[in-house]
Image (spheres, rainbow, N blue to C red):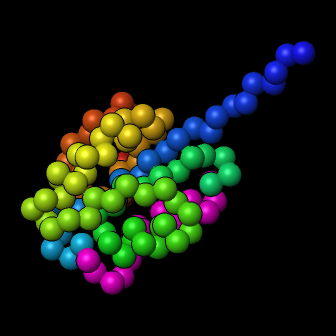
Amino acid sequence: MARKATKRKKSIVILDVFYNDLHNNASFMGGGQKMILKFYELLKDKYDISVVSSQKFFIEKAKNIGIKTYDAYAPANEVIKAYEQHLKDILEKDLMIINNQITFQEHPNVVSWV
C-alpha cells in the first residue's frame, strides 16, 4: 500500500529588525508589527510563519499567539550580531519578508514590506 505524501507548508520569515533604534525595549507596537500579527492570523493554516525581531514587546506578543520567534533583541550597537545568530535558520525559509530597516539581504526570495 502506497503512502500518501504529506506536503509541507511553505515557510515565511518576517524580519522586523531595527539596527539603530535605541527603543528596542519600547512598551508599544508600531503599525507594521500589528499588521504582521494580523498577517499571521490570516495565513497560519497555509504557511509556516516565523518572525525575527529586535523589539522586545513585539517578540512577547508574537510568542503569546504562537508565532515562532527568533530573538534579535539587544542594545542598538549589538542588534546586528543578535540577528546574524539566526541567519542559518532564516536562509532555510522559502520566503523572507522585510518589514523594517534591514540594510542587507542574504535570502534569494525577498519581499520588502513597507
Direction from residue 99 to residue 76 in the image, left or right: left
Direction from residue 89 to residue 26 in the image, left or right: left
Residue at image coords 13%, 59%: 78
x and y percentages locating residue 107 in the rendered image: 34, 35
Residue at image coords 82%, 21%: 3
- Prevailing SS of the magenta stretch: helix
Residue at image coords 31%, 46%: 86
Q: Is 38 in the magenta? A: yes
Question: Residue lying farthest front?
Answer: 1
Query: From this viewpoint, is residue 73 visible?
Result: yes
Question: Residue lying farthest top?
Answer: 1
Position of 76 relative to 50 (above/below) = below
Query: Which image quarter is the C terminus in?
Result: bottom left
x and y percentages locating residue 13 in the rendered image: 44, 47
x and y percentages locating residue 61 in the rendered image: 46, 73
Query: Which image quarter is the N terminus in?
Result: top right
Question: Residue lying farthest bottom?
Answer: 27
Q: Is 32 in the magenta? A: yes
Residue at image coords 52%, 71%: 64
Query: From this viewpoint, is residue 39 visible?
Result: no
Query: Which of the 4 image quadrants contains residue 21?
Result: bottom left
Question: Residue lying farthest left?
Answer: 77
Direction from residue 77 to residue 94 in the image, left or right: right
Position of 6 relative to 3 (above/below) = below
x and y percentages locating residue 56 in the rendered image: 32, 72
Position of 44 relative to 47 (above/below) = below
Q: What range is drawn magenta here?
A: 25-43
Position of 1 relative to 18 (above/below) = above
